[in-house]
Every structure is written in C-alpha cells, then in structure tokens.
Amino acid sequence: MSTLLSSTQHGSVILTLNRPERANAFNFEMTQALQQALVDAENNPQVGCVIITGSGKTFSAGQDLTEMKQGEEISYNEHLNKTYNPLILQIRNMGKPVIAAINGACAGAAFGIALACDLRIAKSTSYFVVGFSGIALAPDSGVSLFLSKYIGLGRAQEYFYTNKPIPAQLAFDWGIVNRVGGFNYQRLVTQMAEELARGPREAFALGKKAFNKAYLPNLEEILMYEGILQEEASKVEEHRRRVDAFFSRRGKS
C-alpha cells in the first residue's frame, strides 16, 4: 500500500498521507514520497496549488516512533537533516501555494509541516498537539519558530511544556488556522484551492519570497539548531524511558 496518495482536482494536486494504521505517522518512506510529490507538483504546469491532508480521521501523529526505536544508534540530528528539515524548507520555497487540510489530530513533526504550509483549513473536530515534551524531546520541524510567530512566545512555551491540545476553534482565534469548517469543511478546502490555482502564479511566488524574507529569514538556521538540540535530548535517559512507556501503553491498548 502506498504511504502517500496523489490525485488532481481543478488545477490542484491533493497529497494524502496514507498510513492510517499508524495514525498517518511519518516513516522515511512517506517523508521521501512527500518530498518527491512536491517536486513533481512544482514542475507540473497544470498544477497551481497543493493540498496536504491525511487519510481517515487523522492528519498525522508526527514521526513514527517505531522507526526511531528500531534504528541502531540512530542520530536524530542526521535524521532531521534527511527528512523534516529539507521538507519544511521545500514547502516554504515552493512558488505554488500549499494548503494544509487538517482533517483530524495533528502532532509533533506533522504540526511543523502544517505550520510551514501557506494556509491551514481545519475540520472543527481537529486539534493540534506540540507533542515533543511527552517523550522528553525538544521541538523540531520548525515548531519552535513557527508556533511562537503565530501565538506568541508565552503561549508556545506553555503548550510545549503541557502538551495540551489546541482545538481547531482556538487555533483559529489565535491565527494558526485560516478557516474552520464542520459539514462544509471539504467545500472550504476545495473553494480555497480552486481560487489559488487560478491566481497569478508569478506574483504568488514572488509574494511568498517576500513573506519568507520578512518573517522567516532565519528558518534554515533554526532548523539546524533544533537538530542539534534534538540530538542532545535523544541521548538523555528520560527520553528512552518515556519512549518505552509509550510502547508499553500501546501494547496494552
């Protein structure tokens, strides 16, 4: 089964994270597939907008911990430099608008991916979780930068420390999300994508560069620093203990 589904609709490509049995958690295969799909979308003159969403009732739980636990002395910094860091930069450097269609829970690295997108449209039942502190890790995938830009440093640190969910409506109130929909969620996504796909592509690309320069001039530097901190956190016994506890709870469920 493909870990990433791709379809086209009215000038947009819809990329669906497709590991529902793992809450659409990212493994290396799915990350690589998403990177390639974004390259293909950028190079396709028939595509004017990209939508990233999840299959089933979840957007994505973030990184698949099974993959990390199975790795022999895996370097978290090296892993980030091969997966999420280039993916985040790829989304921000794409000339075409990218919409995150948040259809359910969105956590950890997936939260960073959603925040890197140009727009976020959330289903009313969806929610966001920073996630990292639950397994004694530091934020990565640009979350430390993006989240504090959207909701302020104090709130960002609170939700990192507490791991409390941010419901869709609160995310809208705080400016994380552009639109929230209930029964009309899918229509909101489709209408926004169609509108963007018809837009002036060169102007959109240049405008995105301007916003990146104004708001995210140090994004690459922050991603690299997050990787260094994540490497340090991964070697602490508390991280290993919490990961073991996570798998123990899952085994009992």
Image (tube, grey):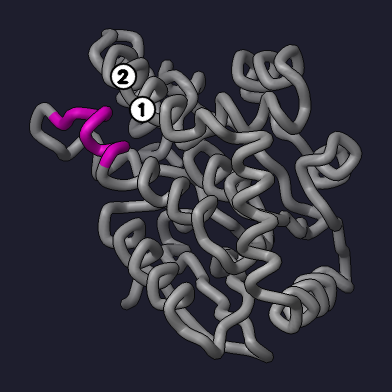
Amino acid at pointer 1: Met
Residue drawn at the location 66% of the way across and 63% of the way down: 99
Read off the residue under disc 1: 224
Which of the labelled discs sits on residue 125, or is there none? Answer: none
> What is the total number of numbered labels drawn onto the structure image?
2
Q: Nearer the viewer, residue 136 or 192?
A: 192
The N terminus sits in image quarter: bottom left
Say few, some or many: other residues with alpha carbon within 10 Å of mark 1 (under 14 / 14 to 19 / 20 or more): some
Say few, some or many: other residues with alpha carbon within 10 Å of mark 2 (under 14 / 14 to 19 / 20 or more): some
Residue drawn at the location 72% of the way across and 76% of the way down: 200
Read off the residue under disc 2: 228
Residue that extends furthest to the top in the rendered view of this protein:
237
Amino acid at pointer 2: Ile
Residue 70, how many percent across, how many down? 17, 39
Residue 182, how many percent across, how many down? 87, 64
Task: Indicate yes or no whether the magenta region holds residue 80.
Answer: yes
Task: Indicate yes or no whether the magenta region holds residue 144.
Answer: no
Residue drawn at the location 68% of the way across and 45% of the way down: 211
Residue 9, how many percent across, how many down? 63, 89
Magenta stretch in the rendered image = 74-81
Most frequent secondary structure within the magenta stretch: helix
Mark 2 or 1, closer to the camera: 1
Mark 2 to mark 1 CA distance (whole Å): 7 Å
Q: Label 1 near label 2: C-beta < 8 Å?
A: yes
Q: Secondary structure at mark 2?
A: helix
